[in-house]
Amino acid sequence: MNKKIKKWIVSFVGIVLSIMLILSTIAYSIDPFFQFRTKDDSYMLSGWFVSSGLIKNYDYDMLILGSSMTQNFDMDVIREELKVNPLHIGLGGINSREIGELIGLAYETGNAEKFFVGVDMSIFTTDTNESRIPSYLLKDDMLSKFRYLLSYEVWFRYIPVDIAFMMLDGLGVELPIKFEYSKSIDKLEDWSLDYSFGEEIVLANYIGGKYAVSNVNTDDLYSRMVKNIDNFIANFDFEKGEHVFFFPPYSSLYWCNAQEQGYFDMYMQAKEYFVNNVSEYDVKVYDFQYAELTTNLDNYRDTSHYSSEVNDWMVKCFASQEYIVTKENLDMNKEILTTNTNAFRKKYAKLFE
């Protein structure tokens, strides 16, 4: 090989490796997804990217995991009521596979002694084979770490934002409270500042089709949900700590819509199947869906999402162990939920004409 060409190739490789080393060092120092450490000076946290790093490296003994129904939990209320050091991972639209990946990672890490998992029955209606959590963030091998340090997400989506906010902080610029929320691990994915709540808002959104609940394919629905519930439960190692499942308190309008679409009874049957099966283990299950507050639309922004005050109420129920559902009281809870739903339908009859 020509000596000049060989020298050029060596120089080129050296430059590329040097650039990769510099970029990796910067990414390691900033570590926007907490893959090496957690810190208090990060910016614009995204749950889909930081959740695995938090599970690996945050100081916690209780993990709260769920969908947007869990995103507004107040960690200070949880600390006060439950006497724990919590980590909250709430990801909007999280599916059963993603829950399984994160709970498995938590088991490997071994930090948590308690696991509180929100259960949305909708995650059992479809077969889920895809995960939105980058696989390299779930692993700890050197290749995955290196891929993280040079990833597109790190360099083009988050490091520029982190640097910009560092500069604004350095200049003493006071940002709106929403940006403070986006920096807080305790407030990860909290959306309470983004919406207003109340009966008029919920009804207007419902009539206008805004935030409408996705249509559910009712063909063979129950058997499909049973299969997915079995797969979901298989993700858990109930010997690894205390496990608590809870059904979020959707509004009565949500259940009226379920009646309209023809899957109300199948959801009830699937919930019964879930409770009966996890009851074989040493777990607690809370069912907030028949609570009286679900009939009051002032607590909601749409058919299912509720205010942070409802989250606080749920935590107090965890502390007092109210609304625990068992094989023995399943039928009673279902009857109350059905009664609430029918009374709500009568009150707002014009909605369903």
Image: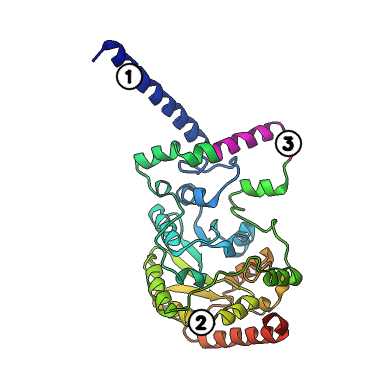
Query: Which portion, as a residue range, is magenta?
Result: 158-174
Q: Which residue is mark 2?
A: 268
* Local SS, label 1: helix
11 vs 39, left or right, is left
Q: Nearer the viewer, mark 3 or mark 2?
A: 2
Residue appearing at x 44%, y 25% in the figure: 19
Q: Nearer the viewer, residue 81 or 203?
A: 203
Q: Which residue is mark 3?
A: 173
Residue 63's x, y, as percent?
50, 59
Residue appearing at x 54%, y 74% in the figure: 286
Residue appearing at x 60%, y 34% in the figure: 163
Q: How many marks?
A: 3
Which three-letter amino acid code belongs to the residue tagged 2? Met
Q: Quadrant of residue 342?
A: bottom right
Which three-letter amino acid code belongs to the residue tagged 3? Val
Q: How is the image coloured?
A: rainbow
Residue appearing at x 56%, y 84% in the figure: 333
* Local SS, label 3: loop
Q: Is residue 329 visible?
A: no
Above/below status of 102 relative to 15:
below
* Mark 3 vs mark 1, CA separation in Å: 47 Å
Q: Which residue is mark 1?
A: 9
Residue 269's x, y, as percent?
47, 83
- Quadrant assignment for the N terminus: top left
